[in-house]
Image (spheres, rainbow, N blue to C red):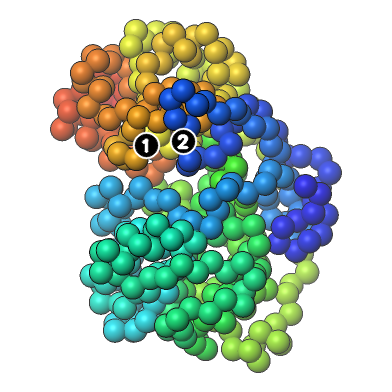
Amino acid sequence: MENCRICGKMLCRESLMDFSSQPASAQGLPEKGNPDRGVDFSVKRCTCCGVVQLDSPPVSYFREVIRTAGLSEEMRKFRLAQFSSFIEKYSLQGKKILECGCGEGEYLVLMQECKGIPYGIDGSAKNIEKCVQKGLEAEKVYFDTGLEKVKKAPFDAFYILNFLEHIPNIPAYLKGIYDNLKDGAVGLVEVPDFDMMLEKDFFAEFIPDHLYYFTAESLQNILNENGFFVLHTENTFHSYILSMQVRKMTQKEKNAFIPEKKSYEKLDLSGMKKAKEKFVKDFMKILSAGKRCAVWGASHQTFSVLGFLQEYDKALLQKKLLFVADSAPFKQGKLTPATHFDIVSPGKIMEENMDTLLIMAGGYSDEIYRIAREKMSFSGNIYILRATGLEKCE
């Protein structure tokens, strides 16, 4: 891919970082007896809009949301507090609120609890069917062109949570949102925080599912240029999420808006490369010292990390790591992409007498640690993948 997906201008010829033998996707996990193959991709930056992006094609399921956050009590509490504050701040009680990429309705339920009137759209007919079965209002819509109309439009507000980074044609999708809102409507937009990745030299967030890696500056520019003023920006949920509250511009404001011309400094990811090399060596030392090792968290981070480790020392990895545990039933019984470890229920950790547990679940890692120590009484060594590397927990 030579041109930016967002503005159409040329991408920098030199890649910022290259990856090989990585999972082709974070979802759609391979079945036993039918393993998949790893893929190669590069991280590049647009010479015009400055957005960092992958040169790989979108995953096959990019129009639908596959979310396991509904299983986490910590995320549930976080979203309830966030939605309540959002509704109170903008007086949205009893107002129509559009969720773009609603999945199976996990957040629609929470928005209802917060006294909003949510309506979901998703590109998956199965997701919409499950929403309807729960008594939620939703329909199968994906803004491929931006001309698509939602039945209950116009809406007073919208939210799109960790979905924008999956969308190949962002201008078209934002146009679809814009045209289905009332003038002055507000919104909540969230993506993984690339500023955090840069600050911490965190290398384990690059996956084919996420086509873009937004800083606060680059996300604000894209939102401004597609008809949304940014009202508030914050870093949330253990620094993994970049969250922006926005307001829809009137057509007059949109026509009069002149984007600021920016010159982008050269982006250097050499720190990430060094951090990746150190991490792999540290991880292999932990595996070498352990007798029966397991990972908890069939996350995109885990899949990427296992790809790095397999490329470095496949024999040691296969010998010491017995399986990957995850609480999501739909992942259990499947294989990790590209590396093909069994994904099992967390109960297997105690059944098989693991002595070393490596937790790799992003913002959910601390919650999993508490479950392992307090509820499961796991007494072995526990390490958590942080943005700064592996942390041993006492």
Residue pictured at 42% horizontal, 74% vertical: 98
Quarter of the image for the C terminus: give it.
top left
Q: Which residue is mark 1?
A: 331
Q: Which residue is mark 2?
A: 29
**First along the sequence among labels 2 and 1:** 2
The reply to whether residue 58 is in sight is yes
Secondary structure under the numbered disc 2 in the rendered image: loop
At x 60%, y 27%, the residue is 37
Q: Closer to the camera, 16 or 129? A: 129
* Circle 1 Cα neighbour tier, 10 Å, few/some/many (<14 / 14–19 / ≥20): many
Q: Which mark is residue 132?
A: none
Q: Is residue 296 visible?
A: no
Q: Amino acid at mark 2?
A: Leu
Q: Is residue 213 above or below residue 97?
A: above
Could you tell whether 137 is left or right of 156 in the image? left
Q: What percent of the width, then of the height, locates residue 215?
A: 60, 55
Secondary-structure class at tag 1: loop
Q: Amino acid at mark 1?
A: Lys
Viewer-proximal residue, 198 or 55?
Answer: 55
Image marks 2 and 1: residues in contact by CB distance under 8 Å: yes
Q: Is residue 60 left or right of residue 40?
A: left
- Can you give x and y, in whole percent of width and height, for residue 160 in the image? 47, 65
Residue 168 locus on image (x, y percent): 64, 57
Q: Residues within 10 Å of mark 2 (few under 14, many from 20)?
A: many
Q: CA distance from mark 2 to mark 1?
A: 7 Å
Tell me which corner region of the image, top left, top right, bottom left or bottom right, holds residue 7: bottom right
Q: Compare residues 190 and 116 and report the one nearer the observer.
A: 116
- Left or right: 330 in relation to 316: left
Q: Which residue is outermost to the bottom?
A: 252
